[in-house]
Image (tube, rainbow, N blue to C red):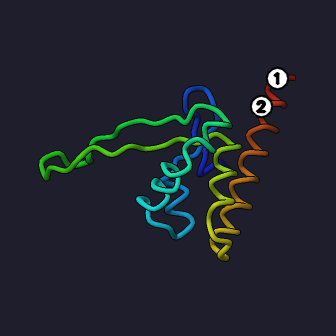
Amino acid sequence: MIKFIVEYDGTPSVSHTIIAQNTDNEVSSVKRLIDNHLSDFEEFGVLGFEIVKPLNTELGGRPSKICYLNEPQATLLLTYLQNTPIVREFKKALIKEFYQIKKDFAIRKE
């Protein structure tokens, strides 16, 4: 069952918000980590992103930028996080999902 990965611009990807939520990190901290090491992530492809508006526009708020990372970028980001038990569990789950997607794709090609 795929629960973390989405298709973004034709590529299996995971958002920085999903990574933050599932590793017990603040979304802003994970985004800052990406911004501070952007050139590292761009070595593995163009970093995808979208601007999303707040859910309840009546209350105001600023749009936010959601980053989408491909498998190598997500792996790199996870190596930059501390190896707490929750981070290690999420690393395993995310790796399993990326491998499952590749396996499913290979089966569909046959």
Q: Residue at x 68, y 51 (%)?
A: 76
Q: Which mark is residue 69?
A: none
Q: Toward the viewer: 37 or 85?
A: 37
Give the labeled residue for mark 2.
105
Say which of 102 and 108 sits in front: 102
Image coordinates of residue 45 in percent, x first then y, are 64, 32
Quadrant of the rendered structure where residue 106 is? top right
Q: Residue at x 52, y 56 (%)?
A: 33
Image-quadrant location for residue 103 = top right
Q: Is 87 situated left or right of 18 in this image?
A: right
Residue type for callout 1: Lys
* Residue linked to disc 1: 109
Q: CA distance from mark 1 to mark 2?
A: 6 Å
Q: Residues within 10 Å of mark 1 (few under 14, many from 20)?
A: few
Q: Relative to residue 77, is residue 72 drawn left or right?
A: right
Assess whether mark 2 and mark 1 are in contact (beta carbons under 8 angstroms): yes
Does 76 sit left or right of 110 as displayed?
left
Q: Which amino acid, by three-letter code, is at mark 2?
A: Phe
Q: Secondary structure at mark 1?
A: helix
**Neighbourhood count class around disc 2 (C-alpha, 10 Å): few under 14, some 14–19, many 20 upward:** few
Quarter that holds the C terminus = top right
Going 63% across and 44% down the picture, which residue do you hit?
A: 40
x%, y% of residue 24?
Answer: 52, 70
